[in-house]
Image: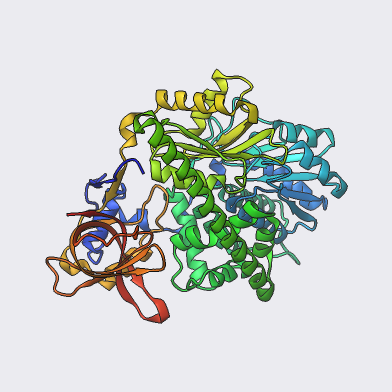
Amino acid sequence: MLRNWRIERRAAAVADGTWPEQMHPVLRRIYAARGVAAAAEVEHRLARLAPPQQLGGLEKASVLLAQALREGRRIVVVGDFDADGATGTAVAVRGLRLLGAGDVDYRVPNRFTHGYGLSPALVEELLPRRPDFILTVDNGVAAHAGVAAANAHGIAVIVTDHHLPGDSLPAAAALVNPNLPGDAFPSKALAGVGVVFYLLLALRAHLRGSGWFGAGRAEPDLSTLLDLVALGTVADLVPLDYNNRVLVDAGLRRIRARQACAGVLALIEASKRSVETVCASDLGFALGPRINAAGRMDDMRLGIECLLSDEPQRARELAERLSAMNAERRELQAQMVEQGEANVAQFLARYGSDTLPVGVVLYEPDWHVGVVGLVASKLKERLHRPVIACAPADEDGLEIKASGRSIAGFHLRDALAEVDARHPGLLTRFGGHAMAAGLSLPAARLAEFAAAFDAVTRRRLDTRLLDPVLQTDGCLAAQDYDLELARQLRYAGPWGQAFPEPLFDDEFRVLDWKRMGETHLRLTLQHAQRREPLEAVMFGGYAGTPPPARLRAAFELVIDDWNGRERLRLLLRHVEAL
């Protein structure tokens, strides 16, 4: 909307390492640009996972859960209402039952009535169930009041979380979070589902050492949960460091072998993906949004029930309902993004681009609180600056809930912490990560918050970061436009956050084009060094005018395997006229 993307080719982050002779030179170049220099770093063996012993709090949490299992205590898992929380809840429930827990239930707060995480109101609603233990998943590190309320009723709370902590920690019986100060765990990028999976590994080891397994009770294979771990990790957009790549790759292999749970297989079917060729992008762009739709539009329980179902037909029914919710979410999101873009355009027309805030805050009284994070994400992409989208928290409109998305190099949660420090009482609550955060505040103080957020953003943000750069892996030789390379690229990841999908750039002549639907393009391109033309598509690439006759494109080399026939295709991400 404001600035044009600039294509910049990635430089090698490491010297060319020692690779098998059969590895394609393009793959070597791609790995070197991502800091990978040895074959061992792309061999995703579970044996090379960071050991659970390095994650603080696991021993204490394992002792408490082992006691609960031996004494038949009631455990209630309290998750979060996003895909990470849903998969983490399913992993916790399934894992504890596999380990021998006889009384495990779960509860996820409703976004619209409880707000985020373990709150005193949620604890009150749990009391009729008489839980002995509450196990939080993907939340709890900031739940001071909720933990205190549980403690007051004699309920022990075990917190598993990955969000950044505040200045103090809740008085939980045990707290597991790789991002706690001083924690020695090497991977700070674990998603919430990854943290609870590590807890299950530690609990199994503790139970093994105490003689829990034996006659009549077999030791379970916890790798059966890795499909859910992979899904939650990718959907939560945590950086795919080596440890996370091992977890995700192992989960994808199970899915491709049809060893996933019924719910994951049903979601793949509902999203028209192929089980045999599923990759990380399918988890992030097809399955994750369907699970998230439940928490955004209604109640995450629907998504969790899909992931807990062992009956294929029931799982299919739930997956179809999630798909319908996701379609409703997409339509609502498009309307809200259009409103947001119109507001920005009006501002620019009236005041000029130089006056646009560096930290943008947008609000509409009819916006849906469950979708504001997606709106912030879309507008962040359009404006290439931090964006916070706000909506009324309830019908009376006295409180606002908001969700923000950031650009690379600007730590959103730290910025909100500075706003909170400079304006005590302005934020009712806040939390999150570098790239995404949530917050609440009184509606009457929205203008004050918008000014404060912009001021902090201007102080903290290097203005050079406002010029968007699209990094590519360079051009391809004519012979590299090849199905075999495309196959290798598909499975050479898993690709994702901080380990980006290979993206190339080159110049082409447009031989033919046609519109697909309202906004998409199908093109036939000619490369100067290649006789055969290339088929390409660009989603969202049609804005009412034909594409340029000659263009420079940033593109992915992908396989179109519609109807079981494999064809090479370029997926265009950005084009510039020549």
**Residue 123 locus on image (x, y percent):** 79, 41
Direction from residue 330 to residue 86 in the image, left or right: right
Q: Residue at x 64, y 33 (%)?
A: 142
Residue 180 in view here: yes
Q: Where 50 falls versus 461 (above or below)?
A: below
Residue 18 in view here: no
Q: Quadrant of the N terminus?
A: top left
Q: Residue at x 60, y 58 (%)?
A: 291
Indicate the quadrant where residue 135 lies.
Answer: top right
Image mark count:
0
Give the residue at the far front of this rendering: 350
**Residue 549 locus on image (x, y percent):** 19, 62
Which scheme is used to colour this image of the protein?
rainbow
Q: Nearer the viewer, residue 406 or 393?
A: 393
Q: Residue at x 54, y 18 (%)?
A: 422
Q: Nearer the viewer, residue 110 or 480?
A: 110
Q: Quadrant of the C terminus?
A: bottom left
Give the residue at the far left of this rendering: 529
Q: Residue at x 34, y 77 (%)?
A: 566
Q: Nearer the viewer, residue 345 or 575?
A: 345
Q: Where 347 falls versus 260 (above or below)?
A: above
Indicate the quadrant where residue 390 lies.
Answer: top right
Direction from residue 287 to residue 249 in the image, left or right: left
**Residue 206 locus on image (x, y percent):** 66, 49
Q: Where 51 falls versus 533 (above or below)?
A: above
**Residue 167 locus on image (x, y percent):** 59, 25
